[in-house]
Amino acid sequence: MKRIVLTAALATLGATLLIAQDAPRHEMQDPDKMVQGGGKLPAGWQARLDGPGAKLEGVKFEPTSGGFHVTSGPAGIYYKADQKPTGTFETHARFIQLEPAAHPEAYGLFVGGADLQGDNQKYTYFLIRQDGKFLIKRRDGAATPNVVAWTENAAIKKADAPGKMTNDLGIEVGADSVRFLINGTEVASQPKTQIDTNGIAGLRINHNLNVQVEGFTVKAATSH
C-alpha cells in the first residue's frame, strides 16, 4: 500500500513539474501590473494581448509628440492594419525603456502579421531586453518557435545609472534575406524563406514595462 501511495505521489509531482515547465513565463513570475487610465488606443491602432483573460484596460498606450508612451500590464502587440508592406521594405523604431523592469522583459518590432485577431495569428518578432540580449521568434497560432534564441550582443546599449536604456531597432527585408539591426549594427541575417515578412508590421511590448517608442516607420526598402 505504501509503495502504491508513494508511486502516485511521485507521478503527481512529475505532472506538476511538467506543467510548471510548460507554463508561460509571466505566469511563473510576477503578475501583470494594474495600470491606471488604460483601455484606449490612438486612432487607427489595434492590439492583441497574449493572455486569454488580458484586457486592454491593463495597458496605457498614449500618443506623444515623437511617438508613443506604453505602460503595459499584459504583454501584447500593437499595429495599424494599413501598415502592411510586401516585397522589400524596412521598419524601424527607437525604444526607450524608462525604468528597469522587475525581470528582463522584452520589446521590439514585428513583421509578417496575419490573422492577428484570430486563432491562426502569425508574425515574426525581433525583441531586446534590459540584460543586453536579443531574440528573433515566430508566432504561428499557439506555437512560438525560435529563429534566434536569446543572444547577448554588444550592439545593445544597456541601462544608464538611473535605469534608462535607449536602442534603435530595425528589420530590413530584402529580395532574398532579412536583416535585423540594433543601433545600425546587423546582429542577425536570415533567409527570407525562414521569416514571415508579407503582412502587417507593428510593435510588441511584453508585460510590466514602461517604454517610450519614437520614430516608428514602415517604408519601402532604400537599399540592400
Image: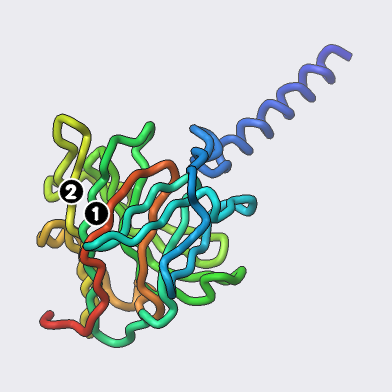
Asked where in the image residue 84 lies, by quadrant, the reply is bottom left
Q: Residue 166 carries which label?
A: 2
**Residue at which label 1 appears:** 95
Give the farthest residue toward the bottom. 87
Q: Which residue is most to the top?
A: 2
Residue type, mark 2 in image: Thr
- How far is mark 2 from mark 1, CA to CA? 6 Å
| Percent of width and height locating residue 204 | 38, 58
Residue that appears at 34% across and 38% down: 104
The image position of residue 61, as x and y in percent, is 41, 56
Nearer to us in this view, 8 or 92:
92
Observer-nearest of 56 and 122: 56
Residue found at x 63% / y 38%: 19
Q: 10 Å neighbourhood of mark 1: few (<14), some, or many (≥20)?
A: many
Residue at horizontal 27 percent and vertical 57 percent from the top: 213
Tell me: 189 left or right of 70.
left
Q: Does residue 162 lie above or below 113 as drawn? A: above
Observer able to see residue 58: yes
Q: In this view, does 138 lie above or below 53?
A: below
- Which residue occupies the foreground of this view, 104 or 154? 104
Q: Is residue 166 left or right of residue 68?
A: left
The image quadrant that residue 22 belongs to is top right
